[in-house]
Amino acid sequence: MTNHPLRPWRQIERRKSREIRLGDVRVGGDAPISVQSMTNTDTSDVAATLAQINACAEAGADLMRVSCPDEAATRALKEICRESPVPIIADIHFHYRRAIEAAEAGAACLRINPGNIGSATRVREVIKAARDHGCAIRIGVNAGSLERHLLDKYGEPCPEAMIESGLEHIRILQDNDFLDFKISVKASDVFLSAAAYQGLAEATDAPIHLGITEAGGPVSGSIKSAIGIGNLLWAGIGDTLRVSLSADPVEEVRAGFEILKALGLRHRGVSIISCPTCARQGFDVIATVARLEERLAHIHTPISLSIIGCVVNGPGEALMTDLGFTGGGAGTGMVYVAGRQDHRIDNDRLIDHIVELVERRAAEIESAKAHKDGPE
Ligand code: SF4
């Protein structure tokens, strides 16, 4: 664990939402905020889709969404759901048969808007399939595809229209006594998205799926998402999230965890704190951090690590991290353990040495945890 104490100014009071289940993952209530991503393979290519799901799960994804545009996709979904290490959300647009097939195939959740399914009979059939197969539903309102009557009423996509759309879909599920749903109101504009989410959070106790849609590439999209999603999480809103990036889905998972880590809402893996570098650096901080990120990607235990160029900020950052290294001195630097100076190490042995220390610390934490939890 990090050494950051839980001060009042560091605490986020989460909105109280109803808890639902997606397979063995709880969403809402006091469940940890889950991170999800979405495959971009051809779903009917089971091997490629499962490879991407496994890579995301390895990076920490709690849930994965898979597009089901046709029957070949829902046929493949059966094997995908069976083999996936995390529950699968089937992404359906409009077609009620695909929704029923996905529920039958073992999806833990359908992403479908009940108002878009068609007749009341079809809606009932989809809800029945979801209920019969223990499948939740995610209502996904998107500013870019609002219903015509709402656009006519409000003139343009706006928070009020998005909230009204969400509540209309909710009403359909509630009228059918179906309460295992969560909801998102995404927009690519952070102001629009945030205002819609804030209004929705007051209007329903359903768990909320956060996202800024079509956010962009890895850098711009992560920043935009961190502002939009981060602002809502900070206000206590959000039970699960997806960072949408034009990038490998694994990057979405990493970005999602970084947002949660920055807000102290979840901890996973090594959090590296490093300085931006300047002429005072006693070793190559940038190359070292890049190498350490690669070498420590397999660590899932929450550990904080400061890698700082010189004594200007090194000792101070080391005080707040589990392990630290500060440059300074002819070709050597100081290793800190739990905030205290521990020993010096040559810069050229730095990476292997830090990897070894982190691995050892992770093993200690895991064994202490196993000891405390006892046998299953
Ligand atoms: Fe420069 Fe030292 Fe600050 Fe790093 S910690 S940016 S090396 S002054």
Image (cartoon, grey):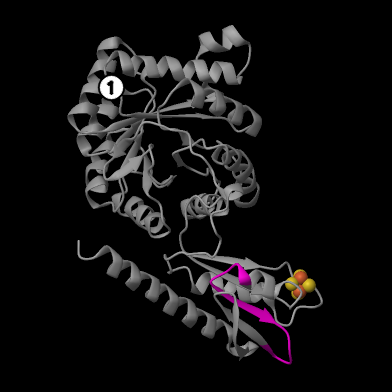
Q: Quadrant of ligand 1?
A: bottom right
Q: Position of residue 272 (x, y in %)?
A: 58, 67
Dot 1 amino acid type:
Phe
Q: Is residue 129 above or below residue 165?
A: below
* Residue range of the region highlighted in magenta in the rendering: 319-332
Q: Is residue 261 above or below residue 173?
A: below
Give the residue pinned by disc 1.
178
Q: Position of residue 300 (x, y in %)?
A: 42, 65
Q: Residue furthest right?
A: 279
Q: Position of residue 64 (x, y in %)?
A: 37, 45
Callout 1: SS:
loop
Q: Residue at x 43, y 69 (%)?
A: 299
| Residue 168 is inside the magenta segment | no
Q: Residues within 10 Å of mark 1 (few under 14, many from 20)?
A: some
Where is the C terminus found, in terms of image quarters? bottom left
| Residue 329 is inside the magenta segment | yes
Q: Residue furthest left?
A: 132
Left or right: 331 with respect to 162? right
Left or right: 55 with respect to 284? left
Q: Residue at x 48, y 43 (%)?
A: 242
Which image quadrant is residue 27 in?
Answer: top left
Q: Is residue 115 visible?
A: no
Q: Position of residue 311 (x, y in %)?
A: 74, 78
Most foreground residue, 274 or 2: 2
Most foreground residue, 68 or 359: 359
Which image quadrant is residue 121 in?
Answer: top left
Label 1 beta carbon within 8 A of ligand 1? no
